[in-house]
Image (cartoon, helix red, strand yellow):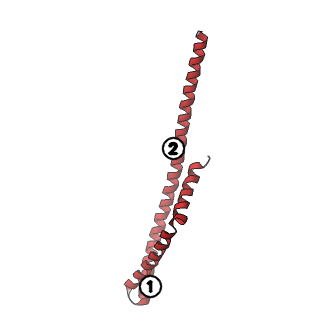
Amino acid sequence: MENNATTIEMLFERAENYTKTTVELARLNVVDKTADVVSSLISRIAVSIVFAMFAFLVNIGLSLWIGELVGKIYYGFFIVSSFYLLIAIILYIFKNEWIKMPISNFMIVKMLKKN
């Protein structure tokens, strides 16, 4: 009878160890996926910031140049800002197809990627 009780205790102990190991593995997988997604997003944000600074300076130069061509400096800024207003309207119309879906797909691919 005691042999039977010892076997049951060992079975419960193994089940407990298996459960702890499974929970720990799941936690480590979540940490790995989260770190992968966050590092990818941070690197993309860093590149985007550098590109935005480049585009900002190019736009100032372009605005000044167009302003000189049309006679008044501030006209160049109005023309360039009107171009960006047009782009903003187009992006707003197509935001789901061009922005939301690619970002969602990127997140899903990163989260479901096998090591």
Q: Is residue 82 above or below residue 14?
A: below
As helix, strand or loop, the secondary structure at mark 1 comes to: helix
Cα distance between the residues tagged 2 and 1: 51 Å
Give the left or right position of residue 8, taking residue 83 as reference: right
Residue at horizontal 56%, vertical 18%?
9
Please state the horizontal and vertical placement of residue 87, each as a whole percent of the image.
48, 74
The mark nearer the N terminus, 2 or 1, is 2
Name the one closer to the observer, 61 or 110. 110
Mark linked to residue 37: none
Q: Is residue 91 above or below residue 8?
A: below
Residue under pointer 1 = 66
Please state the horizontal and vertical placement of residue 110, each as a whole percent of the image.
57, 52
Residue ranking furthest to the bottom: 71
Amino acid tagged 1:
Ile
Residue under pointer 2 = 31
Residue at horizontal 56%, vertical 34%?
22
Please state the horizontal and vertical placement of residue 69, each as a whole percent of the image.
44, 89
Name the one closer to the observer, 112 or 77. 112
Badge 2 crowding class, 10 Å Cα cut-off, few under 14, some 14 to 19, many 20 or more, is: few
Please state the horizontal and vertical placement of residue 113, each as a whole percent of the image.
60, 49
Amino acid tagged 2:
Val
Displayed quadrant of residue 11: top right
The N terminus sits in image quarter: top right
Displayed quadrant of residue 59: bottom left
